[in-house]
Amino acid sequence: MTSFTQRTARHFLTIKAAKEIKKEIEKAGLENLRVLAERGVSIIGTYLQGCSPKKKAEHRRNFNFLIARGITPEMVLDEVARQMPEIAPIIVGKEGYRKAELQKISQFLKGA
Amino acid sequence: MATITELLEALNTKEAAVSTADLATDLKASKEGTLKQLTREKDKGNVEGNSQEGWLITGAGRKALEKGEIHPSMIDEGVTPRQQFEAIGQRIGIKQDRIVLATDIVWSGDYNDVAWVWQALGQADIADDLRSVWVNSWRAKLHKGIPPELEVELTRVTKAEAEAGKGAAQSKPGGREYIIVDDEPVRVGENLGDYSLQDAKDILSIRALRSRLSGVAQAGAGSQPGTAEKVSDILTALSPYLNKEGNSDLNMLRELITAQMDLQRQDILSKIPQPGQVAQPKPFIEQITGFVAALSSLKEAGPTIRSILGIPESSGNPSTAFPVHVAGPDGQPIVMDLGQVIDWKRFLGEEKRADEGHSALIGLTQTVRENLPDGIQALRAAAAEVKGGIGTTLKDSPQAYECGQCHAQFTMPQGVKTDQVGCPKCGTVYTKEQLEGVP
C-alpha cells in the first residue's frame, strides 16, 4: 500500500523520464526510428550502444533510480507513447518488438 | 611517666599478671620508669610480683585506690632536689659513682648555698670546667645569682679582663684596634690601629666585592652591563654600609668611591679611540652585511624579542614579514607589512592560474564530448544504414543547394528531368547550370 504522496511522486517522475526520452527521439528524427522499427532493428539497443561510457552510466543510474521508486520501463514507454502518439504504432503496436526493447533495457541495467 | 593512681588502675583492670613492658605500653610510659614505680609500690604492699612473673594489684592496693589515698611523693615523681642535682651531673657526663659521692658531700651541708656547693664539688675532685657548669646549672635551678666570691670561677673572666672589656666597650665608637694585613684584620692594640673589628670586616667585604666586579668587567668586555647598572648594583649591595655613621665609615666610603671611580675611569678610557686609530667609514657592502646579520640575529631571537620590539607574528615567509615604515599622504607614518602584500599578490596569481586552468579543462572536455559517440548519431547512422548504407546514402543523396534570396536549403528533385528548379520557400527559379555553378 503506497501513500498518495508516493504515487504522486511516481507519476511525475514517469512524466519527466518520458519527456527526456521524447527529446532524444526528436533529436534522432521520427522517420529514422520508424525505419529502424520496420526493419526490426532495436532502437534502444542501437542508442545505448552508441552512447559514451559516461552517458551509459548516467542512464543506468537514472533507470535504477526510477525502478527503486517503483517505476518500470514499461510505464515509461507507455508514457512516451502517450506524449508522442505518432510513435505509438512503433513501440506499442508491435508486441514482440516492444518486449525485445524491454529486454534490452533490463540487460543494460544488469551491466551486459 | 604515669601517676601511681593510673598505675594501680591499670593493674586493677587486669585479671592475670601483666608484664612490665605491657603495663608501660598501656600507660604510654617508659619501661624503666614503670618498673621503678612498681618496685616502690611493691615495697608499700600495693602490688606484688616481679618482672619475670608479672605484676598484680593486691587487696591493699585496691583499698587504697578506692579510698583515693594514693598521693605521689616527690620521690615517686622524681623531682626531689637531690634527684635534680644528680640529673644535672648525669647530663654533664659525670660518672654515676662520682655523682653519688659528690651529691653526698653536697648534701652534708646546705645544698642551697651556691658557694658551699662549689666547695663540696671541689672536695669531690670534680674538674673545674665541669664543676662550674654543674654549679651554674644548679644555681639556675635555685634561681640564685653568682656570689661575688665565685664571680671569677663561675664566669671564667678575670677582673682585669672584665675591666678591659668594659674599656673596650666604652671605646667602641672610636676605638681603632685593628689594621688590615693581607685581607685579614690584625689587632695591634687599643687606639694603635686604623679600624675597629667590625669596620675592618666591612672594609674587607667591600674589597672582595670590588675585586669580583672588576674581574667580571675584565673577563667579559663585550657583554658587560652598563656603567650605570654596575654603579646601581654596587650601591645597592653597600647600602647597609653607607647608611652607617661614624668616622671609620667616612674612610670606608672614601675607599669605596675611589674604587668605583677607578672602575669608571677604566671604562671611559677603553671606549675612547686611541690617537693612532683612524675610524674608516664602512663600505656599502659591509653595511648591508651588518644589516643582514642584525636581521638574522633578530630572527633567531625568537618571539620574545619580537614581542619586545612590537613586530607582529608572520604566518607566511618570516623573511618577508618585516614592517616597512613609510609616510602617508598626510605625512603621518604608515606601517606597511610587505609580507602581507606579497602573500596577497601570490594569492591573486594562484587564483588567476587556477581559473585559466579550469577554463582550458572545460574547453577540452567540450571538445571530447563533441567527438564522443552519441546515441542519437548512432540511431541516425543506423537508420541511414538500414535505408541503404552510409556510403550509398551519401553518394546517392541529392545535392543540397542554398537559395540566394532566402538562404533556404533545397535539393534537385530525383527522377525529374528538368533544367529548372524553384526554391520551395521563396519560389526563385534556378537553372541547372546556375545550381551547379553555385554549390
Image (cartoon, rainbow, N blue to C red):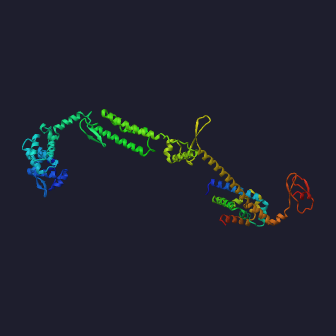
How far across and how far down the image is residue B213, in percent? 39, 42
How far across and how far down the image is residue B209, in percent? 36, 42
Q: Is residue B112 visible?
A: no
Q: Is residue A48 visible?
A: yes
Tell me the quarter of the picture where residue B206 sits: top left
Instruction: Write the residue at 88% across / 62% down.
Output: B414
How far across and how far down the image is residue B358, in percent? 67, 53
Instruction: Write the residue at 12% across / 38% down.
Output: B149
Residue furthest to the front in view is: B276
Instruction: Write the residue at 30% across / 34% down.
Output: B248
Front residue (pair B411, A41): B411
Quadrant placement of the C terminus of chain B? bottom right
How far across and how far down the image is residue B245, in percent? 31, 32
- The number of numbered discs placed on residues in the rendered structure image is 0
Tell me the quarter of the picture where residue A33 sits: bottom right
Front residue (pair A74, B376): B376
Front residue (pair B179, A99): B179
Please give left or right for residue B160 compared with residue B427 in the image: left
Residue furthest to the left in view is: B108
Q: Is residue B118 above or below residue A12?
A: above
Please give left or right for residue B123 compared with residue B214 in the image: left
